[in-house]
Each structure stands twice: as structure tokens, then as C-alpha cells.
Image (spheres, rainbow, N blue to C red):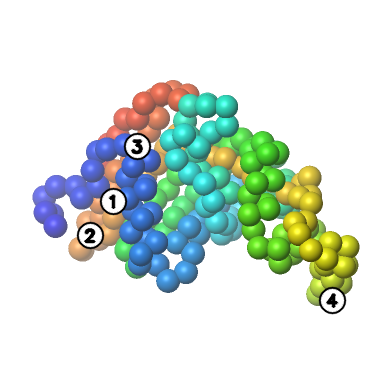
């Protein structure tokens, strides 16, 4: 590697994400699509948790809207769901320890359509469908047995086939306005390149950042 020049190319950020993501799939032992999702309440109080990326790309947008996006799914009545509905913007962080790389993505959120949410929900394993439908995610639970009883009741109600998607179980798409790629370099002289979108659905500009 040439230490005198950046190893993070000035290219299309979605293409660069795809290249790094492909390498992560080869090197990470578990869940290379895991990402930290940061949201905030209306008053700005932040919270963060790990979720899984399920769709992404420059054309990952219903109705052909510009900007593409990064899609995850959740119970909209959970804490993160309530925060998202109150403040429709978020930040994502991928950290691939085996590659010593990070990607930070920031931008507004939009909810996916019912058809897309249905398609993903029913692509999941039946057990995952039941576990999600039975859960009041993030709400107090008096005893784990109560949750397991709900799972059992759904298994009896729907002995085979798909489970109806609960209306509050949905997906959100982050439309990137900033994407930063971080690469570990010797002596903490790390390599960072920031891509910024020029307006809604516009092109990208980029700059290196001091580490």
C-alpha cells in the first residue's frame, strides 16, 4: 500500500460500499450486514443499537426516487421506531473489525411501502415471523414465560404457512446525504474520505479528512 496516497478512491460511494461489503462478507465470521443505528428523540437525546441491513443501493427507492438508500426493518412501536417517527433522520455505522474498516452514513429516513414490508417479512423464517409478531418490542415484560406463551398461541392459530405481518412491523430507508469511509493505517495515520451529496438527489462531492 502506498502510504503517500489515499487508499480510499474518489469514486461512486455506492460502488465503493458494494466493494467493501463484498469483502466483509468473506472475512466477517458473523453478520457482516450488522450496523449501529443511531436515532434521537425530538429533544435531541440520542440512542443507538445494532440492526441488520437488508437492502441497499443507488436504485433502492420506491417509485424511482433519486438518492437510493439503505433499508432496515423493525417494530415501529419499539423505542427506535417511536424515535424515528418523531425525528425522521438517523445515522448508520458499519465496523468490520477483521478488515479494520468503518463506514458512516447519515441522512433522512422514509418508511418503505406495505408491499415491500410484506415481501421482506414473509421472506423470513417462520419462527422469526412468529417471534416478531408476538413481541411488544422494547415494552416492559413481567416474565419471559408470557412472551413464550404468545409465541405458542400464534403457532396454534397459524399451524402452517406465513404469519400475517403486524401493521406496526415495517421498514425504513435511510437516504444518504453523507457517507464516510475510514481505513486503518499504521501509526494511527488513518485514511478517511467523506462523500457529500449535492442537494436532494444530486451528485456527490468528496474530500479527504484528517484522521
**Label 2 vs 4, first from the N-terminus:** 4
The residue at which mark 4 appears reads as 145
- The correct choice, above or below, for 161 with respect to 46 in the image is below
The answer to whether any part of residue 36 appears in the image is: no
Rendered view: 186 above or below 91: below
Q: Are marks 1 and 2 in contact (CB under 8 Å)?
A: yes
Which residue was labeled with disc 1?
211
Q: Position of residue 65 (x, y in %)?
A: 52, 26
Judging by the rendered image, the residue that carries numbered circle 2 is 185
| In the displayed structure image, the side of residue 108 where residue 154 appears, left or right | right
In the shown orientation, is residue 65 left or right of residue 139?
A: left
Q: Earlier in the sequence, mark 1 or mark 4?
A: 4
Residue 62, position as x, y percentages in the image: 57, 32
Mark 1 or mark 2: whose residue is earlier in sequence = 2
Name the residue that disc number 3 marks.
195
Q: Which callout, 3 or 2, points at the residue further toward the start of the chain?
A: 2
Amino acid at each position: 500500500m502506498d502510504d503517500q496516497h489515499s487508499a480510499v478512491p474518489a469514486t461512486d460511494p455506492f460502488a465503493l460500499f458494494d466493494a467493501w461489503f463484498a469483502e466483509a462478507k468473506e472475512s466477517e465470521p458473523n453478520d457482516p450486514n450488522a450496523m449501529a443505528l443511531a436515532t434521537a428523540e425530538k429533544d435531541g437525546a440520542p440512542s443507538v443499537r445494532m440492526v441488520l441491513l437488508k437492502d441497499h443501493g443507488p436504485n433502492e427507492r420506491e417509485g424511482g426516487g433519486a438518492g437510493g438508500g439503505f433499508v432496515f426493518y423493525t417494530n415501529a412501536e419499539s423505542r427506535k421506531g417511536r424515535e424515528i417517527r418523531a425525528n425522521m433522520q438517523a445515522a448508520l455505522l458499519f465496523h468490520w473489525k477483521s478488515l479494520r474498516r468503518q463506514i458512516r452514513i447519515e441522512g433522512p429516513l422514509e418508511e418503505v411501502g406495505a408491499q415491500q414490508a410484506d415481501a421482506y417479512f414473509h421472506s423470513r423464517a417462520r419462527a422469526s415471523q412468529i417471534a416478531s409478531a408476538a413481541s411488544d418490542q422494547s415494552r416492559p415484560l413481567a416474565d419471559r414465560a408470557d412472551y413464550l406463551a404468545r409465541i405458542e398461541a400464534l403457532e396454534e392459530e397459524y399451524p402452517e404457512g406465513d404469519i400475517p405481518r403486524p401493521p406496526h412491523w415495517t421498514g425504513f430507508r435511510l437516504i444518504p446525504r453523507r457517507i464516510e469511509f475510514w481505513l486503518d493505517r499504521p501509526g494511527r495515520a488513518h485514511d478517511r474520505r467523506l462523500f457529500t451529496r449535492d442537494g436532494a438527489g444530486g451528485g456527490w462531492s468528496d474530500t479527504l479528512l484528517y484522521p
